[in-house]
Amino acid sequence: MTNQRIALIPGDGIGTEVLLAAQQVLDAVGRRHDLGFTYTSFDDWSCERYLREGAMMPEDGLDQLRDKDAILLGAVGYPGVPDHVSLWGLLIPIRRSFRQYVNLRPIRVFEGIESPVRGAAAGAVDFVVVRENVEGEYSEIGGRLGRGLPEEMAVQEAVFTRAGVTRVLDYAFGLAARRGGRLTSATKSNGIVHTMPFWDELVAERAAAHPQVGWDQEHIDALAAKFVLDPARFDVVVGSNLFGDILSDLAAAVAGSIGIAPAANLNPEREFPSMFEPVHGSAPDIAGQGIANPLGAIWSAAMMLDHLGHPKEAKDVTDAIAAVLATTDVRTPDLGGNATTAEFTDKLLERL
């Protein structure tokens, strides 16, 4: 039996609820395919820990994760703790210390979920946003000067390196070659005069090394409009940290609900564990009510299976998701139904 060592970080709010659903699905797949999982749960790594002890995780937290095959995260965020504190206290250190420089976010309109966008049909919209995940606009370089004074100022530096941009572009072009053979690059080189022309130059440079992939580039404002007007035209979209972040959330809404959206933070070289998480956040307004949509976490677990070398098992999960949505009316409230998290998960487990 193959055994995978998985770190579980439930986090805050609905993170604990959806992660339990994902774990149940993994266990069901494991029983079917003779695949074992050894879980190490870090239940205390959360905003509540920060309020109590002043840190989201212990000082040796990264060392505790280092020997795991993968990390499955629920959600982070809690009223009273600023979002930049929770993000930079947990997710960002994991992403950067473990060189998870690819953030992968698949977008799919499933049969049985009506997109709010007219013409976004099931089976027609199926693309992936590849987001650069460790540098770009989300750098640590900058600061505040003259706090509280009339002339107070804040400076935030964007950082784009040849190595950082090239490696995420090569991943995106490689993914496009295995999919539909089309890549779109998000840019804003008509207004951002240094980093975006540099990005564009590197896209053209790496495209020459991938002649089997057709590509184009779109300014981010026009691209956001086209995500809404014609989402079926896209296959692989690659963008900087900020652009990829915004585009993938917009695309998840086009697909019907941000509650179904998964994400993978990948170290493609597998030198460090990769981390998988739903996009939806901790949703404190519904936490504890048992009505959170578990699909984002379950789909993230499927992405984890694929990354760990179990593509058939991953497909079993996504096929089960598609079957439940296409053939039943079981839906959580965000999808217009009244099913609980447990009821939806049980229905999906039946399909597995």
Image: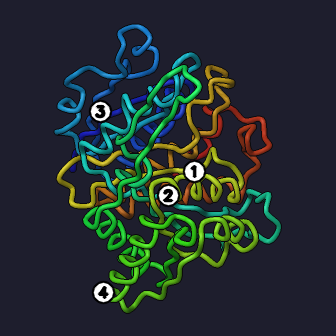
Residue marked by disc 3: 39
Residue marked by disc 1: 261
Q: Position of residue 247 (x, y in %)?
A: 59, 58
What residue do we see at 22% from left, 40% from top? Answer: 68
Tell which of 237 and 82 is nearer to you: 82
The type of residue carrying mark 3 is Tyr
SS at mark 4? loop
Give the numbered dot on residue 105: 2
Q: How many residues crowd mark 2 within 10 Å: few (<14), some (14–19), many (20+)?
A: many
Which residue is most to the bottom? 211
Q: Earlier in the sequence, mark 3 or mark 4?
A: 3
The type of residue carrying mark 1 is Ala
Q: Earlier in the sequence, mark 1 or mark 4?
A: 4
SS at mark 1? loop
Q: Position of residue 265 (x, y in %)?
A: 37, 50
> Compared to 300, does 39 lie above or below?
above
The type of residue carrying mark 4 is Ala
Residue 304 visible from this viewpoint:
no
Residue marked by disc 4: 209
